[in-house]
Image (tube, grey):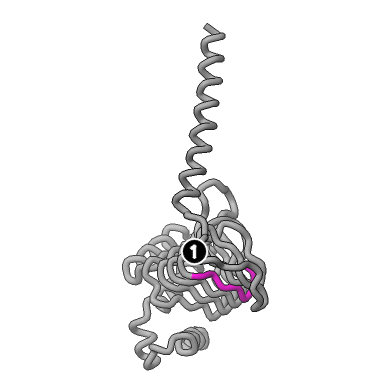
Amino acid sequence: MFEQLKEDIATVRDRDPAAKSNAEILLLYPGLKAIRMHRKAHWFWTHNHKFIARAISQRAVRKTGIEIHPAAKIGKRFFIDHGTGVVIGETAEIGDDVTLYQGVTLGGTGKDVGKRHPTIGNGVMIGAGAKVLGPFKVGDNSNIAAGAVVLDEIPENCTAVGVPARIVKQYGKRVDKLDHIHIPDPVSQELCKMSVKIDKLQKELEEERKKHNEDI
């Protein structure tokens, strides 16, 4: 356990230039505190002490502002920078050497059962406010830009940006010309989707009315 703590502190010092001392990291970094509490919660969860596991995870939320479900699987040298608002769902799996910034969500879409949260590969960086939603994989060494909303699988060694996220680089080479002027309006896209859904529901409602009238 002591060796693991030393590795955790070294990870913070390696990735956060603002860290001044080991004591500061150990006592004042909410990301480190959340990870240590998660390990305890995960142990209780895997040994079928679910209530205790949830109690520890909820205490961690109150102390750090970071919510990690005790069933989530997290690898080595995991680093949460700042951390406020980070949410990691029950079936999420995180590889080694992953970095998350504040406001990141590894969540589900609300439609799936079983495996419903993402799998994050080794060496992935996910920027502030990004949302990764669904039971797919983000490949090794990929970067998710701040504010991106990822709804589909991301291959390894990619950079993904935008809402919804799209791949703009792979293995360091541009694969999509990023146009900051003519990018689609996400609000307009959502309104269009809602309009299609409403039309579909109206048709279904009309069909049900016709069937009802025929039965009468």
Say whether residue 28 is visible.
Answer: yes
Q: Is residue 59 left or right of residue 7?
A: left
Residue 9's x, y, as percent?
A: 46, 87
Direction top: furthest residue: 216
Q: Is residue 213 magenta?
A: no
Out of 159 and 71, give the one closest to the viewer.
Answer: 159
Is label 1 in a helix, a strand or a loop?
loop
Out of 122 and 158, give the one closest to the viewer.
Answer: 158
- Report the magenta residues as a range: 139-145
Direction front: furthest residue: 181
Q: Is residue 28 left or right of residue 178?
A: left
Residue displayed at 41% across by 64% down: 67
The residue beneath circle 1 is: 181
Residue 90's x, y, as percent?
A: 51, 59
Out of 140 and 89, give the one closest to the viewer.
Answer: 140
Q: Is residue 143 magenta?
A: yes
Using the image, determine if residue 119 lies above or below residue 171.
Answer: above
Direction bottom: furthest residue: 21
Residue 188's x, y, as percent?
A: 46, 49
Residue displayed at 38% across by 85% down: 26
Out of 183 and 26, give the one closest to the viewer.
Answer: 183
Residue displayed at 56% across by 9% down: 214
Using the image, determine if residue 132 lies above or below residue 2.
Answer: above
Residue displayed at 54% across by 63% down: 46
